[in-house]
Image (cartoon, rainbow, N blue to C red):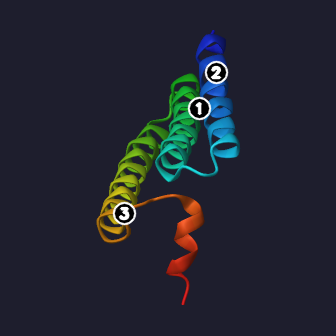
Amino acid sequence: MYYRYIIVAVVLLLLGGWGVVFNRGHFIIMVVSIELVWLAAFFLFLINSIERDLLIEQVFTIMGLTIAAAESAVGLAIMVAYYRIRGTILLRSLSSLRG
């Protein structure tokens, strides 16, 4: 019954994975692709919780999405600050962050 939603979640998961693999040079696209993978995983949790009629998985999904959004916001804020200092956010230039 929920097979259509599972197909959508798997397509989102594949698109996010391909975005990470094929866009290794652009940090912002990688962050968005990782968020897409998280969204697909939590969407699968949500589908499973609706199918089994469990409330705890729905609460876990909401908490996980909140944590993923906060993680993305902090990472993008760090990248904006780094861009203001260095003038670029290419991943090749991020190796200068090492000690």
* Earlier residue among tags 3 and 1: 1
Say if mark 2 contacts mark 1, CB within 8 Å.
yes
Q: Amino acid at mark 2?
A: Ile
Q: Which residue is mark 1?
A: 44
Percent across and percent down for residue 67 are 39, 55
Label 3 to label 1, Cα distance in Å? 39 Å
Q: In this view of the protein, which residue sits in the foreground, 32 or 50?
A: 32
Q: Secondary structure at mark 1?
A: helix
Q: Secondary structure at mark 2?
A: helix
Percent across and percent down for residue 61 are 45, 42
Q: Which residue is mark 2?
A: 6
* Earlier residue among tags 2 and 1: 2
- The answer to whether 38 is drawn above or below residue 93 in the figure is above
Percent across and percent down for residue 62 are 38, 42
* Earlier residue among tags 3 and 2: 2
The quarter of the picture where the C terminus appears is: bottom right
Q: Residue drawn at (50%, 79%), measured in percent from left and top? A: 97
Q: In this view of the protein, which residue sits in the foreground, 69 or 43?
A: 69
Q: Residue drawn at (34%, 55%), measured in percent from left and top? A: 70
Q: Amino acid at mark 3?
A: Gly
The tally of labels here is 3
